[in-house]
């Protein structure tokens, strides 16, 4: 949910020399515009946070008539999609969050090859495997988000790193507004509750 809220954040910078946007606030009052799906209860809070950062939030319904009527002819498998944020699970229970502009399966194969051949790439996945002897669960790699632009993917990667504190990433990724942290923490708390509930239902 939270990653969707951040979709296209900072990506649509359309500042236009003082021209108003359809009668709304003058564009030069904001340094960027974020077009986001509307989520009741969270969108209002995010709008205030973004405004404090000089970003205008425009919300739209995720379900539109066009999205219901138009379907792509060829659905690309997640592993073959490019411009993605992905999550690698380790047998120890920790995860690694990464992003790539290439097909996800190509990047995962590189991680696997580096570990098997004791490669020289200094990725956090390789470092963790060599230091602990743990094995990544390649069959459980998850496609978790998309971003057509490098900066968009970096923002989403940073958010997912914070959503999954039990990670082996060396750092928290690109810097994101501190004002987002309360929303991210709230999301983490809800996620933890859902996980505990699921574990209780399946002892």
Image (spheres, rainbow, N blue to C red):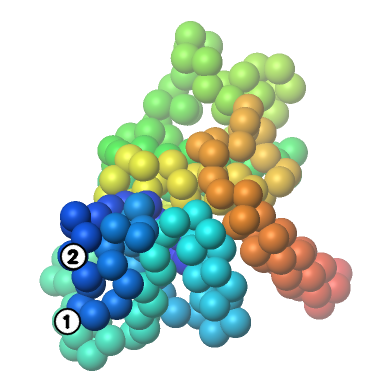
Labelled disc at residue 160: none
Q: Is residue 161 visible?
A: yes
Up-down: is 154 above or below 191?
A: above
Of callouts 2 and 1, the N-terminal one: 2
Residue assigned mark 2 = 19
Instruction: Identify which residue, 56 or 172, lies in the foreground.
Output: 56
Dot 2 surroundings within 10 Å: few (below 14), some, or many (20 or more)?
Answer: few
Q: Residue at x 43, y 42 (%)?
A: 154
Could you give the CA–CA distance between mark 2 and mark 1, rounded to whole angstroms? Answer: 34 Å
Percent position of residue 147, x then y: 34, 51
Name the side, left or right, on which 70 lies relative to 101.
left
Up-down: is 97 above or below 3?
A: above
Labelled disc at residue 70: 1
Q: Secondary structure at mark 1?
A: loop
Outermost residue, left side: 73
Q: Residue at x 67, y 40 (%)?
A: 167
Quadrant (top left/top right/bottom left/bottom right) for the C terminus: bottom right
């Amino acid at each position: 949910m939270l990653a969707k809220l951040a979709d296209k954040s900072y990506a649509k910078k359309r500042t236009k020399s003082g021209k108003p946007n359809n009668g709304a606030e003058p564009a030069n009052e904001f340094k960027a515009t974020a077009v986001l799906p509307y989520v009741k209860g969270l969108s209002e809070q995010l709008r205030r946070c973004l405004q404090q950062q000089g970003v205008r939030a425009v919300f739209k319904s995720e379900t539109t008539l066009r999205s219901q009527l138009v379907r792509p002819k060829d659905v690309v498998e997640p592993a073959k999609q490019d411009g993605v944020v992905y999550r690698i699970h380790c047998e120890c229970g920790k995860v690694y969050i990464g992003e790539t502009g290439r097909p996800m399966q190509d990047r995962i194969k590189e991680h696997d090859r580096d570990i098997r051949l004791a490669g020289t790439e200094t990725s956090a996945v390789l470092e963790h495997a060599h230091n602990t002897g743990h094995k990544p669960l390649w069959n459980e790699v998850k496609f978790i988000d998309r971003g057509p632009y490098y900066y968009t993917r970096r923002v989403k990667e940073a958010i997912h790193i914070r959503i999954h504190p039990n990670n082996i990433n060396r750092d928290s990724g690109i810097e994101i507004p501190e004002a987002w942290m309360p929303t991210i923490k709230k999301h983490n708390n809800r996620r933890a509750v859902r996980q505990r509930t699921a574990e209780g239902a399946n002892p």
